[in-house]
Image (cartoon, grey):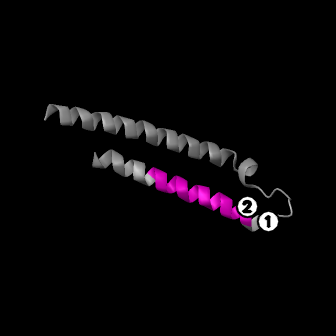
Amino acid sequence: MLAAAANATVLRVFFSVLLVLILAVGFFVLQNRKKFFTHTGDASDSYASADLRRWRVILVWIHAVIITTLMIFEV
């Protein structure tokens, strides 16, 4: 029983650190969003494709935050 409690604590710490890293990366991307997601002016690039790239990254980040947060409380 003691080993299971120790393993759960280690997993909570791991997922907490992972959550902090995911949040930090999200805030970094938010600060540099113009550099990453602006329209480049190429013939193959449009404002709609730039907006879709931005929303795809945002949705993946939101899901990563939610799943990691759930893992902290499920362990």
Observer-nearest residue: 20 or 15? 15
Residue reaching furthest to the left:
1
Question: Is the Cβ of the residue at disc 2 closer than 8 Å to that at disc 1?
Answer: yes
**Looking at the rendered structure, which numbered label has been put on residue 46?**
1
- Give the extent of the magenta segment: 49-65
- Name the residue: 67% across, 45% down: 31
Where is residue 27? Give x, y as percent: 59, 44
Image quarter (top left, top right, bottom left or bottom right) of the C terminus: top left
Residue reaching furthest to the bottom:
48
**Looking at the rendered structure, which numbered label has been put on residue 50?**
2
**Looking at the rendered structure, which numbered label has been put on residue 30?**
none
Q: Quadrant of residue 50?
A: bottom right
Where is residue 42? Give x, y as percent: 85, 59
Kindly identify the amino acid type of the residue bearing the numbered disc 1: Ser
- Give the SS element for disc 2: helix
- Name the residue: 69% across, 50% down: 33
